[in-house]
Image (tube, grey):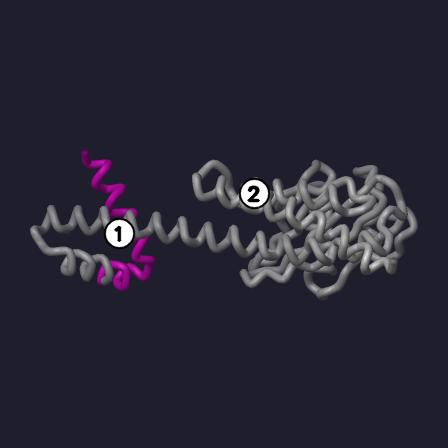
Amino acid sequence: MCAVSLVEGEATAERQHLYEALQRAVALQQRGETDAENALRQLNETTVASIPGARYCGITLVDEDGRVKSIGATGTYAQILDEVQAELEEGPCLSAAWENHIMLIDDMTVESRWPRYCAAVVERTPIRSVLSVQLDTPSAGVAALNFQAEEPGVFDEDSVELARVFAVHTTLAWNSLQRERQFQTALGSRDLIGQAKGILMERFDIDAVAAFNTLRSLSQDLNIKLSEVAARIVTDRKAAE
């Protein structure tokens, strides 16, 4: 059996576990019991167990302002590696995220790319192998899914192919959680606007349409979001009570 066929079979066996983890994560988020960070950590814990040689896993995010963040890390070392990349502005995870490549370090002690990064990682951690795959996220910024291990040379062809598969699933999970977050934010904004409308209707004896138009006019005059205007009105009302 060729390596790709073997990988596909293993990936199929693991997909159900990943989907179940995703369902649990989204369900928890919908109940307000966890945030996207914790939800992605749950997914990464499932993913890292499926990649041959991997001991740790995390997501490197470079946001629209160029800031490097570590998301859903399954261990301290994954976070430290992102801190090093943020400090030095170089590393395999950043290269994978920016350049749309898979980046592999077999042995951190002899790697010639990213010399400052490698030296810092060797000094601060026992990590010697790193595998990074870009995530195709539609949100602002770029991201990569990363796997680390203390031993050199642990990531083989199967590891790389499986990492590709699980990067796709992680992208789906990421996008699903982002949509859920946006939905919850929209619900919260709607509730705030409804409360603010009620306050204006009571205070000025106007109907719902007039109250909404007042909020919209204030938003335009102050050059801030409608939800922010509503939040200020609700906060002022509570402070006055």
Residue 67 place in picture, x, y as percent: 61, 53
Q: Is 85 placed left or right of 24 in the picture?
A: right
Q: Amino acid at mark 1?
A: Ile
Q: Amino acid at mark 2?
A: Ala
Residue 160 place in picture, x, y as percent: 80, 56
Picture layout, residue 102 above or below residue 117: below
Q: Secondary structure at mark 2?
A: helix
Q: Is 187 placed left or right of 206 in the picture?
A: right
Magenta range is 217-241
Q: Is 181 placed left or right of 108 in the picture?
A: left
Residue 35 place in picture, x, y as percent: 51, 42
Whether residue 114 is visible: no
Query: For this rendering, which residue is in front, 12 or 76?
Result: 12
Choose top left, top right, bottom left or bottom right for residue 92: bottom right
Residue at 72% across, 41% down: 80
Choose top left, top right, bottom left or bottom right for residue 225: bottom left
Mark 2 or mark 1, earlier in chain: 2
Q: Is residue 69 magenta?
A: no
Q: CA distance from mark 2 to mark 1?
A: 29 Å
- Residue where numbered disc 2 is placed: 39
Q: Are marks 2 and 1 in contact (CB under 8 Å)?
A: no
- Residue where numbered disc 1 is placed: 193
Mark 1 crowdedness (10 Å alpha carbons): few <14, some 14-19, many ≥20: many
Whether residue 175 is visible: yes
Q: Is residue 221 magenta?
A: yes
Number of dots carrying numbers: 2
- Residue pushed farthest front? 1
Quadrant location, the N terminus: bottom right
Residue 49 place in picture, x, y as percent: 74, 41
